[in-house]
Image: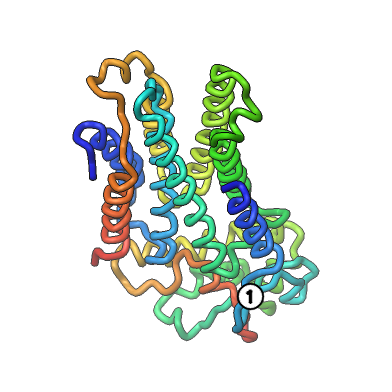
Amino acid sequence: MKWLLGALFLAGAWLVVAGLPVAGPQPDRAPRFGGGLAVLPMTFTHESHFGQPCATCHHEFADHRTGQTCMACHVTDPKAAPFLEAQFHGLCQSCHVAEHAAGRPAGPTRRCIACHLDDHGF
Amino acid sequence: MVTGFRGAVLAGVIAAVFATSFLAEPFRGGGWFWDLGNALGLLAFAGLLFQMIPVPRKRSVRRHEVLGYWVLGTAILHAFWFLAGDGTVRFYLLPGGPAHMWLGLAGLIALAVLSVLARMPDRLRVHRHYRQFRKAHRILGFVTVGMAALHVVLSGFYLPAWWQAGVLAGVLVACVSGRRYWARLAHAPAASVSGYLIIGAMACVLFLLIRDGTP
């Protein structure tokens, strides 16, 4: 049994370090969105979010600061960058989870890879 | 099959752990993939709590041992479910990952060590005296349960209210302590693997139906 557990541990460690050995797009953590912070890619379309009030996400409208994409500011602003994951999970995921709990079409809720793939258009 | 009252204790522990997650926001779900993976984790945690009930295991020690392997198998399945099923989860186990994931990994490794060191003949190689083994096994069990409980509580998704952590802690304390109370039972709690699998499968299906199958 100890050999089996050892083999499983090594397999798990390999999965963590090298990622899944499958074809198809897999996420990587790298500097993106114009910043130096190594972050995961993200998929997002405005089309799938029609019906949501713009200011729910676009706080810069209320702050009268426009011109940059969300991510460009959130990965370069030294005050915001450390909270990137918490802020975006709090904003995006909590809304999707609430919609799912209410029985409405919710899109991705918890499956990480459902959001963390590059759509090259965010 | 579930063996009378003995199986009922296991059913009660599994029910208590799963029910704790439904005390607040019962329809909060993350999709069938996520919820099934985490139902397996909750089942492993409940099995671990059952294994920690402090009773003499003179005649049921073999059942305790075999059930322990299945609890370990469930915990491993929980871990690989996410690692192999979602290419992004691995980033949570790399440097910078959240504490609850490291605690889950540490708890799983501790559970594996707990199982390996309790297995003959390795047990005799490490512990020459039974008392020494029993003490070490119990202490490592406490460490494993503690890390697993923190993993569940700090991940937070199924226990969104702070007081749910208190309820889960209450279930944990009831299972790992109260030797005098447990000794009053006519039969020491023991359960078969088939009982664990049947009750566990029912709990997982209910968990999925409630979180993902309700309109």
| Residue most extreme to the top | B180
Image height check: is B172 above or below A97?
above
Q: Which residue is mark 1?
A: A21
Q: Position of residue B56 (x, y in %)?
A: 38, 20
Residue under the image location 37 percent in, 18 percent down = B178
Residue under the image location 68 percent in, 79 percent down = A67
Image height check: is B169 above or below B56?
below
Q: Is residue B126 left or right of residue A38?
A: left
Q: Position of residue B83 (x, y in %)?
A: 56, 63
B182 or B19, nearer to the observer: B182
Image height check: is A17 above or below B23?
below
Q: Is residue B65 left or right of residue B86?
A: left
Q: Position of residue A40 (x, y in %)?
A: 66, 70
A73 or B87, nearer to the observer: B87
Residue neighbourhood size for the residue with mark 1, other residues' Cα within 10 Å, grouped as few (<14), some (14–19), many (≥20)? few
* Location of residue B196 (image quadrant): top left
| Residue most extreme to the right | A36
Secondary structure under tag 1 reads loop
| Residue most extreme to the left | B4
* Location of residue A117 (image quadrant): bottom right
Q: Amino acid at mark 1?
A: Pro
